[in-house]
Image (tube, rainbow, N blue to C red):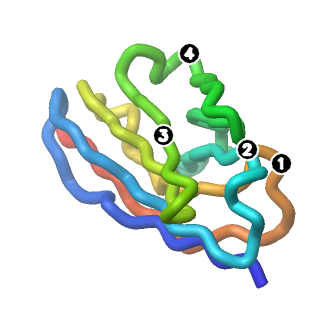
Amino acid sequence: QVQLVESGGGLVQAGGSLRLSCSASGIIFSINAMAWYRQAPGKQRELVAGITNSRGTNYADSVKGRFTISRDNAKNTVYLQMNSLKPEDTAVYYCNTLRPGAYWGQGTQVTVSS
C-alpha cells in the first residue's frame, strides 16, 4: 500500500526559504522517478520538479534557479529546497512518482506573504 507523507510547509515572507520533505513507503523507492507537484487555489495541480532514479532533474520554468529537488534512497525520502520564494509559490505541495496513479498524500501547505 503506497503512502506518501509530505512535511515542511509553512508561512514565510517573500524572499524566504523552506525545505519540504516527503517520506514514501509501499513502493520500491529507489527505482522510481519522483516529483513534487503543487496546487494553488482555483488552479490545476502542476508539476514543479522531478528527479529520476539516477538523479537527473527537471524543473518548471517558474521555479528554475530557485528550487532544488533531491532524494535520499536510503531514507525513501525526496526533498524540495525552495529559495527566493514568491507569493505566487503559495500552494499545497505534494510529492508522488513522476507517473502518479490515483493515490495522493495530504500535501503540505506553503504560504508566501508579500
Q: Position of residue 62 (x, y in %)?
A: 50, 19
- Residue receiving disc 2: 33
Kind of residue at disc 3: Ser
Give the left or right position of residue 104, taking residue 36 as reference: right
Q: Position of residue 54 (x, y in %)?
A: 68, 33
Q: Does residue 84 lie above or below 1 as drawn? A: above
Instruction: Point out the tag, 2 or 4, that comes first from the N-terminus.
Output: 2
Q: The N terminus is located in which quarter?
A: bottom right
Q: Does residue 111 lie above or below 28 as drawn? A: above
- Give SS at disc 2: loop
Foreground residue among 86 and 22: 22
- Residue receiving disc 4: 61
Kind of residue at disc 1: Arg
Foreground residue among 6 and 110: 6
- Residue receiving disc 3: 70
In 3D space, how far apart are the residues under numbered discs 1 and 3 (Cα atoms)? Answer: 17 Å
Return the mark for residue 99.
1
- Give SS at disc 4: loop
Q: Position of residue 30 (x, y in %)?
A: 69, 54
Mark closer to the observer (1, 3): 3
- Give SS at disc 1: loop
Kind of residue at disc 4: Asp
Mark closer to the observer (2, 1): 2
Mark closer to the observer (2, 4): 2
In 3D space, how far apart are the residues under numbered discs 3 and 4 (Cα atoms)? Answer: 18 Å
Residue plotted at (25% across, 58% down): 10
Q: Residues within 10 Å of mark 3 (few under 14, many from 20)?
A: many
Kind of residue at disc 2: Ala
Mark closer to the observer (3, 4): 3
